[in-house]
Image (spheres, grey):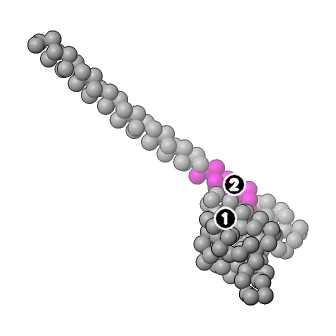
Amino acid sequence: MKIAEVSEKYGLSPDTLRYYERIGLISTVNRKENGIRDYDEADLQRIEFIKCMRRAGLPIDVLIDYIGLVEQGDSTIEERKAILQEQRRLLVTRMEEMQQTLNVLDYKINLYDEAVLKKEKAMNRKIVKEAIAE
């Protein structure tokens, strides 16, 4: 798959894909005879993993460390697991903080809804009184 196709499929710019390759997050991508990158299934799986981890908030340096451990083989399984567990813990904490923020926003929105209802009721009473007075 060409870099433009990978870029479109994963929503990453070609520059980002080249950067990931340059810093070692993606192994050196095979190239066709004309020098154009040709991403294979393993490259695409790695990109999906990187995107997932970035969405979860993993910093690039942590990903570089993790990928380095993957490339060292099975002797690093416990270290890799520890990285993932720590990142999971951090993600859960961020999610809890986001939920608290969401709760505050919902509360504030509800206050505005209640204020609008009060004004509408007051306006309706005024309209009814004026209609009766006529």
Amino acid beneath label 1: Lys
Q: Is residue 62 left or right of residue 75?
A: left
Query: Considering the numbered disc 2 on the image, is that residue within a helix, a strand or a loop?
Result: helix
For the N terminus, the quadrant is bottom right
Camera-nearest residue between 20 and 92: 20
Residue drawn 18% across and 20% down? 126
Q: Position of residue 4 (x, y in %)?
A: 65, 73
As drawn, which residue projects farthest toward the left?
Answer: 134
Q: Nearer the viewer, residue 53 or 72?
A: 53
Q: Is residue 83 left or right of residue 96?
A: right
Please check the rendered image and state whether residue 86 is part of the magenta-colored stretch, yes or no: yes
131 vs 11: above or below: above
Residue behind mark 2: 88
* Secondary structure predominantly adopted by residues drawn in magenta: helix
User: Which one is in front in this view, the residue at disc 1 or the one at disc 2?
Assistant: 1
- The answer to whether 108 is drawn above or below residue 68 in the figure is above
Tell whether position 93 is magenta: yes
Query: For the residue carrying disc 1, how many other residues have a C-alpha within 10 Å: few (<14), some (14-19), or many (20+)?
Result: few
Picture residue at 89% right of the left edge, 67% below the top: 74
Element type where label 1 sits in the image:
helix
Q: CA distance from mark 1 to mark 2?
A: 26 Å
Q: Quadrant of residue 24?
A: bottom right
Label 2 packing within 10 angstroms: few (<14), some (14-19), many (20+): some
Q: Does the rendering let one see residue 23?
A: no
Look at the image and give the residue range highlighted in magenta: 83-94
Instruction: Give the residue type that dot 2 points to.
Output: Arg
Residue named by callout 1: 9
Give the percent coordinates (x, y) of residue 54: 64, 63
Q: In the orientation shown, which residue stands out farthest toward the front? A: 34
